[in-house]
Image (cartoon, rainbow, N blue to C red):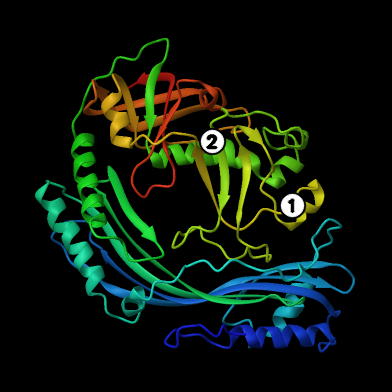
Amino acid sequence: MLPEDLPANIPYSDFADQMVELLRKAELGASANVPKVKGWRFDASEGRSVTLSIVDNKLGGVYGPATARDSLGGGLYLIWEDEMRSLASIDRHTIPEFEERLAEWRAGAYSDERAPDILEPQPTPDIVMFDPAIMDIVDGDIAELFRTLKQGETELRSSEVEFLDAGASASLSMRYLRNSKGIDLTYPSTMYSYSFYADSLYGNGYGKRKIPPAGELERIIEDVKVNTKHLKREAEFKPNPDGCRIILSPGVGGSFMGSYIAGNLSGSAVSNRQSAYKLEDFKEQKQVLREDISLFIDGLRPFEPTASRATGEGIPGGQSYLIQNGKLIAPSLDLKYAGITGFPPTPGGGLYVLVDDEKKAFEQMIREMEYGLLVYGVLGMHTQDTTNGRFSLSAPRSLVIENGKIKGKVKATISGNFFESILADDTAFSWEPFEDSPAIQFTCSVLVE
């Protein structure tokens, strides 16, 4: 069922209605080749995106033609009358091929005594995720995309950038979330993004569900210009054998927090003892971070990519602490692992780092550093054992900071234990405008090539 307040010019199809009709027939045993379906849910998105890019990787070259792409896809979960389960992908061919697909889904069915039931409908938050200004771009008026890339190309050329990867895109999608117990959610969302990556050294960009505010493009371009120049200039760094101060840029800091902290909050990992934290640690609210640090699920931030009215299982979007004041509160749980652990399922949304009274700007943190490295990229994160906290990573794009000034680039290797670093009193955080992940400053071992 479509919401009454849906803008009239948003395209949508009857895909969801047809899927519901076919699944209802499967509940009644319309197919003689498979058992009846006892319960079902599906989460599908249908949309269009338009993209413009610089395709030859060289400034002054030809812009790639705008490409428009229509898409429809999602996931399906079935419970058969004999309690077998099926998980499958759905696409625009699912409806005309439904009988064949149904047989395939049954052939791939599995048994799982701990698999979840279908969720009853619950109220979902009304989050602003749609910017009507993006509609015209998706409909073919790409002047704004071209202007964005042209401005970036022109300004980066003036700063002696030789090679550029750049792209800008806009998209509109309609989400259909349905299940056999009455969940019937349909809503539109938009996305607008652009990025510039200069000389295979440094990149930055924008990506939210609305047109960027005035001045944001200029800020991104200036950031790429300045840091690309820094990374082209070689420097020297003399590591202190007792440890060096480093700053992980927001992107790298987010990678560390995601791998070492958020990754260990996975309900699956906790339940299967593949996490640094045990289920008992959450029940006892064990202290694992400093008291001023929290990790917070938030699906209620307007226009953010992480905004969520519901998860694919139908769990409403919302807000919830996973770690509060440094103490473990709950793992990140879907319906299955909520049932296994006894904790409530986690609301839909993104994970954010909150630090009490920490409002320092990223640039201020750089100005206040006496001697150390600013790390803009690491290699090998996927090879680390994130359950013990230890890391040893190549950091080929590290900038030397001396008395608050950036001197140039060195290739370094950083190593230490992130669990110990995040607990240290002198570990500090700072933020860039519009960045969700903080930069993180701490002490670790450094080797320079």
Tell me the tag on residue 169.
none
Count the marks: how many? 2
Q: Residue at x 33, y 37 (%)?
A: 361
**Identity, as a three-letter code, of the amino acid under mark 1:** Pro
Label 1 SS: loop
Along the line of sight, which residue is nearer the eye, 11 or 318?
A: 318
Mark 2 to mark 1: distance in Å?
32 Å
**Residue 118 sits above or below residue 408 on the image:** below
Quadrant location of residue 229? top left
Along the line of sight, which residue is nearer the eye, 130 or 313?
A: 130
Residue receiving disc 2: 383
Along the line of sight, which residue is nearer the eye, 263 or 381?
A: 263
Label 2 SS: helix
Is the residue marked by circle 1 packed among few (<14), some (14-19), or many (20+) residues within 10 Å? some
Q: Of the residues under marks 2 and 1, which one precedes in the sequence?
A: 1
Along the line of sight, which residue is nearer the eye, 127 or 53?
A: 127
- Where residue 255 appears, as percent x and y from the top left, is 47, 40
- Where residue 440 appears, as percent x and y from the top left, is 42, 32
- 399 with respect to 283 (left or right): left
**Identity, as a three-letter code, of the amino acid under mark 2:** Thr
**Residue 360 sits above or below residue 5 on the image:** above
Residue receiving disc 1: 344
Quarter of the rendering occupied by the C terminus: top left
Q: Residue at x 51, y 60 (%)?
A: 307
Q: Residue at x 57, y 56 (%)?
A: 349
